[in-house]
Image (cartoon, coloured by chain):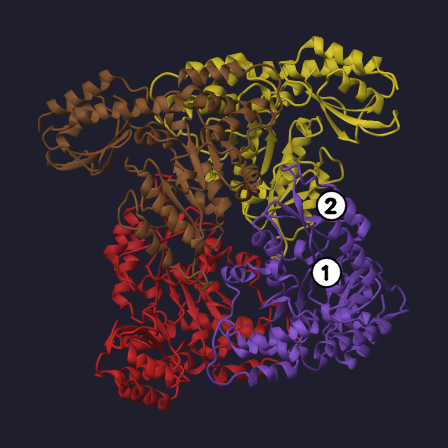
Chain colours: A red, B purple, C brown, D yellow
Amino acid sequence: MKFASDNNGPVHPKIMEAMVRANEGHVPAYGGDDLTRSAIEKVREVFEAPQASVFLVPTGTAANALILGSLTKPWDAVFCSNFAHIHVDECHAPEAFTNGAKLTPVGKRIDKFNSSELKTAISGFNPSNIQQSGHGPVSITQVTERGTLYGLDEIAGIADVCREAGVPLHLDGARFANAAAALGCSAAEMSWKVGVDAVSFGATKNGALAVEAAVIFDPARAVEFRRRQQRAAMVFSKSRYLAAQMEAYLTDGLWLETAGEANRLAGLLEAGITGIDGVEFAFPRQANMIFVWLPRFRHRALKEAGAYYYIEAGVLEGDDPHEPLLGRLVCDWSVKEADIAKFADAAQGARP
Amino acid sequence: MKFASDNNGPVHPKIMEAMVRANEGHVPAYGGDDLTRSAIEKVREVFEAPQASVFLVPTGTAANALILGSLTKPWDAVFCSNFAHIHVDECHAPEAFTNGAKLTPVGKRIDKFNSSELKTAISGFNPSNIQQSGHGPVSITQVTERGTLYGLDEIAGIADVCREAGVPLHLDGARFANAAAALGCSAAEMSWKVGVDAVSFGATKNGALAVEAAVIFDPARAVEFRRRQQRAAMVFSKSRYLAAQMEAYLTDGLWLETAGEANRLAGLLEAGITGIDGVEFAFPRQANMIFVWLPRFRHRALKEAGAYYYIEAGVLEGDDPHEPLLGRLVCDWSVKEADIAKFADAAQGARP
Amino acid sequence: MKFASDNNGPVHPKIMEAMVRANEGHVPAYGGDDLTRSAIEKVREVFEAPQASVFLVPTGTAANALILGSLTKPWDAVFCSNFAHIHVDECHAPEAFTNGAKLTPVGKRIDKFNSSELKTAISGFNPSNIQQSGHGPVSITQVTERGTLYGLDEIAGIADVCREAGVPLHLDGARFANAAAALGCSAAEMSWKVGVDAVSFGATKNGALAVEAAVIFDPARAVEFRRRQQRAAMVFSKSRYLAAQMEAYLTDGLWLETAGEANRLAGLLEAGITGIDGVEFAFPRQANMIFVWLPRFRHRALKEAGAYYYIEAGVLEGDDPHEPLLGRLVCDWSVKEADIAKFADAAQGARP
Amino acid sequence: MKFASDNNGPVHPKIMEAMVRANEGHVPAYGGDDLTRSAIEKVREVFEAPQASVFLVPTGTAANALILGSLTKPWDAVFCSNFAHIHVDECHAPEAFTNGAKLTPVGKRIDKFNSSELKTAISGFNPSNIQQSGHGPVSITQVTERGTLYGLDEIAGIADVCREAGVPLHLDGARFANAAAALGCSAAEMSWKVGVDAVSFGATKNGALAVEAAVIFDPARAVEFRRRQQRAAMVFSKSRYLAAQMEAYLTDGLWLETAGEANRLAGLLEAGITGIDGVEFAFPRQANMIFVWLPRFRHRALKEAGAYYYIEAGVLEGDDPHEPLLGRLVCDWSVKEADIAKFADAAQGARP
């Protein structure tokens, strides 16, 4: 019953096989090999963006921080949600890679913000007052950090505000595939077609070993990216093994297949615990993450039964068996249906 | 005839198999898994340093820059050789990770410096004059960037100067294994036993996919390392695949076996071209790298025959067929003896 | 009618005379002169802190940013109020001098926060989770950016939380003298005696030309300050002229005299407009700053009469003559009583 | 006998009087005052550069570092001489303000380099190899750190190499006035007319209290300067007192008058010690600095007679009375002729 994180899951066999297949002879290092070129081309194809600048990096934080570094001046504000991964989970990598930008939360909700809240936030800074922060990029996360989704129209609305303000829009797509699968849209439809300027296109959480693509649609914005990547010690000598992952991930729609499967499994899990006494969903389940309030006694029973997942609010220790604690349940493609059933049973069968 | 770089070679089958073996089920992310713990323990064992702080990172520049970041104040000088990789090949990653330290070449030779040159260099800065650079760490590369080796006594001499000056000694061991195999010494003998305080312990060039260990012998110097690594976007979620590489690399002496083989092959290559008319070795061949002057016509013949390697000084185009150009030839464990023979023949058989 | 800022006022004659007096012959540069030593000693005396580390710098932002740089790791949160000068008015100097710390607003009020809000804010970060911000210093401003004061007990309460959390407490005292004069307390009583660890001790706004003292009570926290100051290009060669200002400022209680006078004048101004129809004070006037809502027609009349001050919320242009706009009125010691009377008359006499 | 530094001298009375004169009433802060505007206009006039971007800062290091910050990418080399102030005397401020550029010495001489050495240095970096440093600005110092001068043709030659390489040329003019007075040329002739792109125009060493102008001839290169200055805590609230200094400095040719006088006095000093037994000039005296070898016994006699100056090489303590030690003697406009005569007598009259 492993629902702790899609970071904990294995590499998809097709991706591992691609790495093994790439392991033949000598090829040029640092991205000069054919496989790297072809994987980058594949990313462009999937995004229907033949001009896009694409870079392969090993971690999601690297993609986020290098993109933000390319889009942001040290004195700029970066607008994001209160719980944005870049703001609360990256140990100031964005501050480091931008050389001191200020991550500035927008709105009140913890997962998302809307175009009107963004407008208010941006207008809070007067760019001609140089004592204040300048107008820097806007960054949204899709799937959000609370498992919800921005609708395409919501993204378009936010992009409109960005365009008016003259600032670029970044999408942290650590779970881009889960979102695309859930919305039934293409990569292009969820990015440049609704006004997104740069995407951190995740693969690691969805079946890869360690690879993400930084995609910047206007190459003029990416001219320094490679320098920044090199200076960040993020250029792999044996680039072919990053490329092999990305190539396999995008071949025959594997990325949407694994993501769709993860979403489906999360749906099963949601259904399995729906209606159990005391169960309350904190956010609508829209992709592969569930945030759910459960009474303490149910959490205890689940943990005793061997379930792995995080408790996001509250502590397992405590006197009141009925106090609700917030659990986070994440599925990747490799989760077993039997484990889901077992989890639902354990949750159902718990006694205070 | 692939002699361009040990970065261009494949992953050793045993290492690839270890990664495949690790690809089973869910395990904790970000280094909380058993395999990461065990790989770190293995590094400590190999270095006979049970207290050492050890961190797995994907690139050699990451190991170097994170270690230097841990040992250096922004206003310090980092003492290194004129051609140190950290100085001329890392796109200012050391400057970035130290927040502005000054890499300060020592001595006149391009591969190495000695303890007396180091003494002179350090004494050039008065640490009580705060307008000048402070005394920061010393960094040596072993195997050096020109394929030569520091003898253990030379390292010990340098370490003595460091101790007197109160500064730590870092060893960039991108080819640590090749050096240890060539010197016939243990990891401990080539590091803390001769006064080295921190090692970038390379594996990528010697058969791994992408993993290096940052080894800091005094844990007090490493308390902030993990924060720095996280902030540098260098913590892998699926840490087990870094660990699997390092574990396999250190199991049953594989690291010394592949390095010894690379050195042996380079020796064969050296022997193969020794005595050819116009061939002059720029540096003694001591490990797996050869720097050799060859007349232009021999380079041309080699390139036409399909040999891959870098020309470090001079250009292939040019009128004088006898002008010597400096070639760099590198062997990894996977180089074929037949290719070596073919190379020697092509070099020998060339005509102006 | 110059109420725009105490930054706009002249240098007090006694301070200017001290600079002229210091202008005699050659003396050692970079702080090696007797006058610098004596001015630093004077700061220690006024703070009753003979061991304190004291540095003279030309701007308040320099004092704040260099102190924060000394107290903060790049991955730490700096806790401050929503409107803290360091957060919204220093163009990311604190981010630059800390190399990427995250300024983190505490509480809901815009001028101050209390110890309980601080506790909540600090406990929002788990220092053992290295993806999150670490626990860095707390910074309060006294006089606050909205002209109010922290009581000594309030500071002590905040300092208690800091001590428990193991983080230092910084006080941005750009208007330290105005606060001390208003509270009738000594420099020591408003700083280390209530648990403050470091003070930006302002003089510029209160009669100096350009000098502030960075005061760090525990010298162990200041060992790198001088390096940071030099690297920040903030060490004056002709240090004697910074010193002469500070020396005169602290001689015969001039600092409290000018501050007391500024406060008294602000009190007169407050009294002068109290009771005028539509006048509403946004914050209690506690030192030399007034934040007051006035109907638009009164602002217009004042501006036409030649009054200088900032409108902080709302715009002078607009249809409704009765719409309240927020004005900020600041007095320094040089403001004329006649101008205050004239201002009150103009405010009173305005017609919609 | 105060020959230690032109940093140690007093403020010229005309400049101090201008500051006193400016001390009247309230004026806008942060450079919004008329005096700042007029001082900036005056700098443009003196440089015959009506379009130039001009900024007033309090220290020479600030001018240098902020200009380099504006001209340099973090991964660029900054080309300068071995003894450039920016390289060896600014505690890594240039590294800090450029966020990690690499100061790269050019040539072998310690005071100057020539266009051919510069060409060699720049061509040592291949800008398309992103592992290496990029091509950043070139910086020369005039008067050099060893008291010598670049001729206008030498500067023009260096500027030609810069233009070819597509990099800007910065001139650190801490003693700009002394150079212009010595060469008998105008500010324009020593800057943009010979291809200089940016000047740190010093005043502090030549009679001001603390003010330098950063002059960037192409405003497109200066668009971020003001942000950088603010973020560096280098914007004075009471800007009028920086402006008053610069205004007075440039009025009626005061800057050339004080510089010419300093040069003349240094010439007298040079003449006074010329021909004394054991005296050898290390560099030609071309402006207001003298570098001279004197036997130890003469240094001792001078120090005993109360002379202040630095010994740059060798130590006063030592057995051999005849060992030559390198003294540095600097004159500002305020040095007394009687002191020069006294110095020459003491040097002459010394006995081993």
Marked residue chain, label 2: B
Along the line of sight, which residue is nearer the eye, C89 or B314?
C89
Identity, as a three-letter code, of the amino acid under mark 1: Val
Q: Is residue B317 visible?
A: no
Residue D223: percent from left, percent from top = 44, 39
| Residue in the picture at 29% in, 20% down | C335
Q: Are marks 1 and 2 in contact (CB under 8 Å)?
A: no
Disc 1 from disc 2: Cα separation: 17 Å
SS of the residue at dot 2? helix
Q: Mark 1 vs mark 2: same chain?
A: yes
The residue closer to the viewer here, C113 or C315, is C113
Amino acid of disc 2: Ile
Identify residue for label 1: B196
| Foreground disc of the pair 1, 2 | 1
In this rendering, is residue A40 above or below D73? Answer: below
From the top left corner, tell me how far across and down residue B250 is, in percent. Answer: 67, 77
Along the line of sight, the residue nearer the viewer: C14 or B272: C14
Q: Quadrant of residue B294?
A: bottom right
For numbered disc 1, what is the local secondary structure?
Answer: loop
In front of the other: C330 or B237: C330
What mark, if any, has residue B122 been given in the picture? 2
Chain on which label 1 sits: B
Mark 1, other Cα within 10 Å: few <14 / some 14–19 / many ≥20? many
Image-quadrant location for residue D132: bottom right
Name the residue located 50 percent from the left edge and 15 percent from the top edge.
Answer: C20
Location of residue C294 in the rendering, given as x and y in whole percent from the top left corner: 16, 33
Whether residue D266 is visible, yes or no, is: yes
Percent x, y of residue A112: 29, 63
Q: Quadrant of the N terminus of chain A?
A: bottom left
Residue A60 in the image: above or below residue C169: below
Horizontally, residue C15 falls left or right of residue B171, namely left
Query: Dividing the image into 4 quarters, which one contains the C terminus of chain A?
Result: bottom left
